[in-house]
Amino acid sequence: MSGLLALLDDVAGIAKVAASSVDDIAGQAMKAGSKAAGAVIDDAAVTPKYLTGFDASRELPIVGKIAWGSIRNKLIILLPIGLLLANLAPWAIPPLLMLGGSYLCFEGAEKIWHAVFPYEHKIHDPKVHANPDPAHLEEQKVSGAIKTDFILSAEIMTIALAALPQSTVWMEAAALALVALGITAVVYGSVAIIVKADDMGLHMAANGRLGLTRAIGRGLVKGMPVFMKLLTIVGTAAMLWVGGNIIVHGLHEMGWDVLYDFVHHNAEVLGAMVSEGWRGTVEWTATAAQDGVFGFALGLILIPIGTRIIGPAIAAVTGGKADAH
């Protein structure tokens, strides 16, 4: 009996360790995933454009195809590469992280630039027909969305990997896999809700039994375009904030402290002007705002480099055309 009790005690101990490991993995994944907020919001804001022009019955299947492609991007390609870098070439992660941060700054600044100085980008492509085959068009759109997702997923996974504490390779793999699955579910679940919200609104407005139901339906139909614009604004601000923060901290870790000290000194000065209860909030807000301003300035510098040098070079190598989303 004593042997059985000892065995049960050992099993209970193992179960506690396993439960603790699961909690650790979940906690690490949550913290790491939150660091990728800018890319996540951008992903959710970008994807709906690939559904424009399709019949409503094809919207959710297309979202599902893109989501499955996103999971493959993260789990089959990016996760193994990230683990190899973390364990064999950890020195490569900060430069890659800063490269991803620079891309976020470029994307955010370019969105603002196009909003302030709008232009019509016309592409003359003999392969594009007036009435393309719907199935072929869907395949092209899904392929384009998955390629865009790969870039955003690479940013997300790199940011998440850098945010994970030192651990075993299996813990890192499990946390990254949880980040990949969780973020994919959040992004494409949100996209599915967004793209079907106007259809739901139309249904409620036309078939609702109560006046309140019909009013909510009409509100959804009228409000979704505004919501999409708001999502784009929030996504752009998040990209600039996260991108700027990555660059500032990256330079600090590399020994260049001028910008980091400047940002934190200003935040502390502003924090000292308010009561103790609000100090942390004010300092965080001030830091984020300065990171965003720096991210925007860096992005403006990168716009001509990206559009006139890097974009055409990639197009020349791939035989395609440069296309910023």
Image (tube, rainbow, N blue to C red):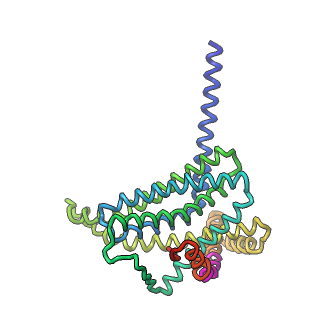
**Region of the chain picked out in magenta, as a range:** 294-305
Residue at 64% in and 48% down: 172
On screen, residue 225 versus residue 179, left or right, reads left
Q: In the depicted view, which residue is nearer to us: 65 or 222?
A: 65
Decide: is 236 above or below 180. Answer: below
On screen, residue 244 versus residue 228, left or right, reads right
Task: Give coordinates of residue 124: x percent, y percent.
Answer: 43, 82
In magenta stretch: residue 178: no
Task: Give coordinates of residue 175: x percent, y percent.
Answer: 60, 49
Task: Give coordinates of residue 219: x percent, y percent.
Answer: 31, 69
Residue at 69% in and 44% down: 168
Classify residue 96 by image quadrant.
Answer: bottom right
Q: In the depicted view, which residue is nearer to us: 217 or 127?
A: 127
Decide: is 248 above or below 20. Answer: below
Residue at 52% in and 78% down: 111
The answer to whether residue 266 is seen in the rendering is: yes
Decide: is 34 above or below 144. Answer: above
Count every numbered label the image shows and give the total: 0
Task: Give coordinates of residue 3: x percent, y percent.
Answer: 65, 15
In magenta stretch: residue 297: yes
- The prevailing secondary structure element of the residues shown in magenta is helix
